[in-house]
Amino acid sequence: MSTRPRTPAPNTPAPGKLPVPELIEMKRRGEKIVMVTAYDAPGARLADAAGVDLILVGDTAAMVVLGHDSTVPVTVDEMLFLTKSVTRAARRPLVVGDLPFGSYQVSDESALENSIRFVKEAGADVVKLEGAGPMVSRARAIVEAGIPVMGHLGLTPQSATALGGFKAQGRTAEKARRMLEDALALEQAGCFALVLEAVPAPVAARITEALEIPTIGIGAGADTDGQVLVYHDMLGLYEGRSPRFVKQYADLAAETRRALEEYVADVRGGTFPEEQHTYSMPAEELEAFEVELAAARAEIAPQARQRPRAPR
C-alpha cells in the first residue's frame, strides 16, 4: 500500500496538474491559453470543470469581493486566505497567487519571503507581480528560489495613480519600445509568462512575437498567446463600471437578485418552507415526545408559581 500523501507538498505538481513548461509548448503549437480569476472554492471548481488552464487569485479581490475602490488595500493575509480556498478546489489549472501591493516592492528579500508564503501556506503553484525596473530583480530572486513567476506589464492596477489612472499604456512609439524592453528583461529574469493589460493590439502582437514565453492578454488584442478576464466582470456580478475590454457572458447579478426577491416573498408570504422541505419523525416517537413534554411542563409549573415576583 502506497504511503504517498494524497495532497502533494506545496510547489510539487499534483497528478493531473498542468505543468508550467507546457505553457511554452502551447505557445509553440499555437494553442490559446485560457486564464480566469477566481477567489473561492466554488469559483475554482467551476473554472476547472470548464477547462481553463490557469486560475489567477487576483488582487482584484479587493474590489470585486472585499468592496474596496482599488486593489491597493488588500493584504497578504487576505490574499493567502482566498488563495487557499481556490487551491482546495482547482485540480488541473495552475493557481497563480497575485502578490498584493506592498508585499514585494520593498526588497528582493521581502518579495521572496511573501512568495514563499503563497506557495507554502496557500498552496499556490506560481506567483505574479506587476511592473519592471526594480521588479525585474524581484522576479529573478523569486525564480532563483524555485518559484515560477508571472510578470505583468501595461496597465498595472497597483500603480495606476502613477500611470495617470486606468488608461491604456504603450500608445506612443517610445513607451511601446520601453514596454518591449521590459518584457524582454522579465523573460531574461526567468518569468514563465507575461500578462499584458490595456496595451494597443499591435504593440501586444510585437511583444508576443519577440518573446519565447507566452503572453496573456487582457485588453491587448487577439494576437497574444492567451486571454484572461475577471470572474465577476465576465459573469455580470460586479456593480462597478467594467473596462471596455470586458465581454460579459452572463448577467448573474440580475438572476441572483431575482432569486433572492422570490425567496423573500415566499418567506414573508408563508409559502416557504413547504412539506417537501421539512423532516418528519415516526408517529410513536412524536407521541412519546409529547408525553415527555407534558410531564416536563407539569414539573416546571409549580416551581414557576413559587418564584417571587419582581417589584414593579
Image (cartoon, rainbow, N blue to C red):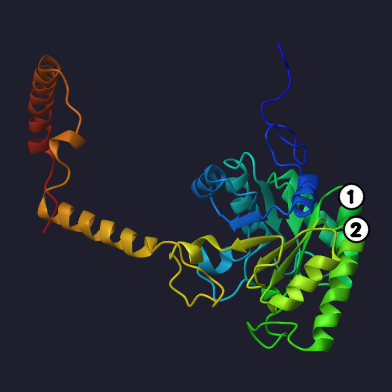
Asked if residue 290 is positioned above or below residue 143 in the image, the reply reads: above
Mark 2 residue crowding within 10 angstroms, few (<14) / some (14–19) / many (20+): many
Where residue 31 appears, as percent x and y from the top left, is 69, 52
Report if residue 108 is visible in the image.
no
Q: Is residue 59 left or right of residue 66?
A: right
Q: Nearer the viewer, residue 103 or 83?
A: 83
Q: Amino acid at mark 1?
A: Ala
Q: Does the residue at mark 1 contact the one at mark 2 (Cβ under 8 Å)?
A: yes
Query: Residue 145: which disc?
Result: 1
Asked if residue 255 is positioned above or below residue 163 in the image, the reply reads: above
Q: Is residue 306 left or right of residue 233?
A: left
| Rendered residue at 11%/50% (across/down) | 270
Where residue 143 appears, as percent x and y from the top left, is 87, 54
Mark 1 residue crowding within 10 angstroms, few (<14) / some (14–19) / many (20+): few
Please tell me in which quadrant of the rendered image residue 61 appears.
Answer: bottom right
| Rendered residue at 72%/85% (across/down) | 163
Q: Nearer the viewer, residue 244 or 38?
A: 244
Q: Residue furthest top?
A: 1
Where residue 218 appears, as percent x and y from the top left, is 64, 69
Dot 1: element: loop
Where residue 247 appears, as percent x and y from the top left, is 50, 68
Residue holding disc 2 = 141
Query: Residue 188: which disc?
Result: none
Query: CA separation, marks 1 and 2?
Result: 6 Å
Number of numbered discs on residues:
2
